[in-house]
Amino acid sequence: MTQQKSNWLCLFVAAGLAFSLAGCGGSSEDSSEGDGASSSSGKGGDERSASTGGSSKKGNDDRPNVDGIPINVFFPEPLAVAAESGEVVAATTPNGEVPGANPVAPPETVETPEEPKPAAGGAVAWNEVITVDVLKDELKSIRLLLQQRLSTLASYNSSYLEIPIFATTMSLMAEVARRHPDDVSWKKNAKYIRDLGVSMVAVCSSSDARGRKSYDEVNGAFLKICSILDNNMPAELPEAEEDSDFLSSADMGYLMKRLERGMQWMQNNAGSEDAFKENVAMAKREVGVFAAIAQAFADESYGYSDDEEFTGHAFEMRDASSQMSKAADGNDFGTFDELRSKVDQKCTQCHMTFRTG
């Protein structure tokens, strides 16, 4: 009996050695998903249960055993298994982690790029749209045109339908000057010019526009505008709000007619290289006014600021007009004329879809 126990003890030691050399119960292909996971031996097809706490307990087991240890936990030929297993190298990464394990990495911090910030209050950079010099030149031109049409009652009665186009453009230029970052001598009084221009349009657009009474009202408002432009404040000016939107300042229909007149002028006076070079200064003024009108059209007060098609036309017209101004500075007729065709197309496309006035 002592000899039999000795033999069983040898087998037990050999089996333990085989387990140690074989990597503690499995080949390197076995993976552990966590504590308490089950595994199976690669030899003999017998199943065994891994302990959950790392300690073994003897229970009521009727299987053949040696000192309470079931015989079938050993390999049939443990010494042979030990000889075949060879050296087992622990598979770890340089930092000691077990490959195949997938620790939960902290979520990556994705930086959200800041969106471009609009100008303060959504303000337009008017100095990039029209210069104060072009603005003043346009007001000077309008002043001369209105002087001709308001010189007498007869001249007024024959041209009162044109006056709203000029007066509306004058009101627009005054409102742009009020918002412009650059200074003009009458800037603090631009609101009066704007509102007086609006009153002229109202009279000339009324059913009783013709006649002495209407002429006196329109001419009286115009003379006050001239005084303000000359830095002489007239008496009895009507009250005027400092701020105003473009809808209240300039009727869109009349501004579109101003664009039509401007396109016709450029075709007749800047449609050839010789004519362009002869009238380059006036051509530059025209496209500056075009850019300002196109920019104003995108103002939310007109009700089209959310319409991408309309604002697309307006901004393309504005940008093309600005490029025409640069072409005029360089006496580049080819570029100027090409862009003039583009602006004309934009006017046509816009009128086909959004005809106003």
Image (cartoon, helix red, strand yellow):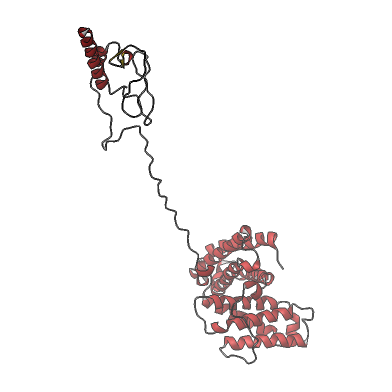
Residue 211 placement: quadrant: bottom right
- Residue at figure coordinates x 23%, y 22% from the top left: 87
Q: Is 295 above or below relative to 81?
A: below
| Depth check, front residue: 26 or 236 | 26
Q: Quadrant of the N terminus?
A: top left
Residue at image position (62%, 72%) is 246
The one nearer the camera, 250 or 57, is 57
- In the rendered image, residue 322, in percent from the top left (x then y), is placed at 53, 67
When the figure is inspected, residue 211 is found, relative to residue 288, above or below; the finding is below
Q: Residue 204 in the image: x percent, y percent? A: 73, 79
- Left or right: residue 345 versus residue 38 is right
In the rendered image, the quadrant that contains the C terminus is: bottom right
Q: What residue is drawn where x is 53% and y is 69%?
A: 121
Question: Along the horizontal axis of the image, is 283 left or right of 37?
Answer: right
Q: Which residue is at the front of the view, 266 or 88? A: 88
Counting from the top left corner in percent of width and height, residue 123 is at 53, 70
Q: Is residue 331 visible?
A: no
Q: Is 213 situated above or below 131? A: below
Residue 77, position as x, y percentages in the image: 27, 11
Q: Name the residue located 69 percent from the left edge and 81 percent from the top edge.
A: 199
Q: Is residue 252 left or right of residue 62?
A: right
Total numbered labels: 0
Figure quadrant of residue 70: top left
